[in-house]
Amino acid sequence: MAKLESGDRAPAFHLADQTDTKQRLSQYKGRKVMVFFYPKANTSGCTTQACGLRDIAADIGDVAIIGISPDLPDKQANFDEKHSLGFPLLSDPEHKVAEKYGVWAEKKMYGKSHMGIVRSAFLIDEKGTVAEAWYKVSPKDTPANLLAAVESD
């Protein structure tokens, strides 16, 4: 699967969020967007990542935050409510958007292979272009990377 790089056009998406409202990347034209992909709502790493982004939201100005995972909207809603995240969590159960972003890949756990989300994050600029791409990002580094990217502007 090809990976996105700075300067690439960010793939469009049209997915349901935790309230079953359809969200499009094009809705955010004119502002920066952090799109992060996580494997599964309410797991320890995903909670660390999402809560870390929630905690810096006031420090990143007008940058929108959007999470995407294969979880269905009701699971995304539970994740949002449980941790007071306050940003859209999109449902990509068929991993079509994950594939476009190059984050659906073979993973190995306990000697067994399976397909899944490679935790990754993307800062998309006001024109819909990838400004930064962080593949295989750690949950704790996601907010730090975003802060550093916003501060360097």
Image (cartoon, rainbow, N blue to C red):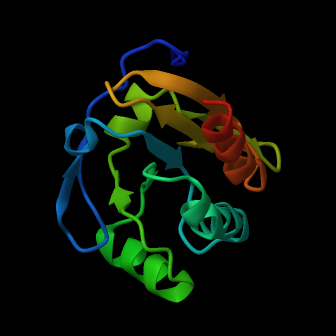
Residue 134: quadrant of the picture: top right
- Residue closest to the eye, 82 or 72: 82
Q: Is residue 150 above or below residue 38?
A: above
Residue 132: quadrant of the picture: top right
Q: How many marks?
A: 0
Which residue is rendered at x = 42% and y = 55% of the image? 70
At which x and y percent is residue 29? 25, 36
Whether residue 35 sits left or right of residue 120 in the image: it is left
Which residue is rendered at x = 71% and y = 67% of the image? 48
Whether residue 140 is visible here, answered yes or no, is yes
At which x and y percent is residue 89? 39, 62
At which x and y percent is residue 97? 35, 37
- Residue closest to the eye, 149 or 70: 149
- Residue closest to the eye, 23 or 28: 28
Which residue is rendered at x = 53% and y = 35% of the image? 122
Q: Work out which residue is located at the far bottom of the displayed protein and give it.
A: 82
Q: Work out which residue is located at the far right of the displayed protein and give it.
A: 110
Q: Is residue 59 above or below residue 151?
A: below
Q: Which quadrant of the figure contains the C terminus?
A: top right
Which residue is rendered at x = 41% and y = 63% of the image? 71
Whether residue 113 is visible here, answered yes or no, is no
Whether residue 45 sits left or right of residue 77 in the image: it is right
Residue 120: quadrant of the picture: top right
Whether residue 6 sits left or right of residue 127 in the image: it is right
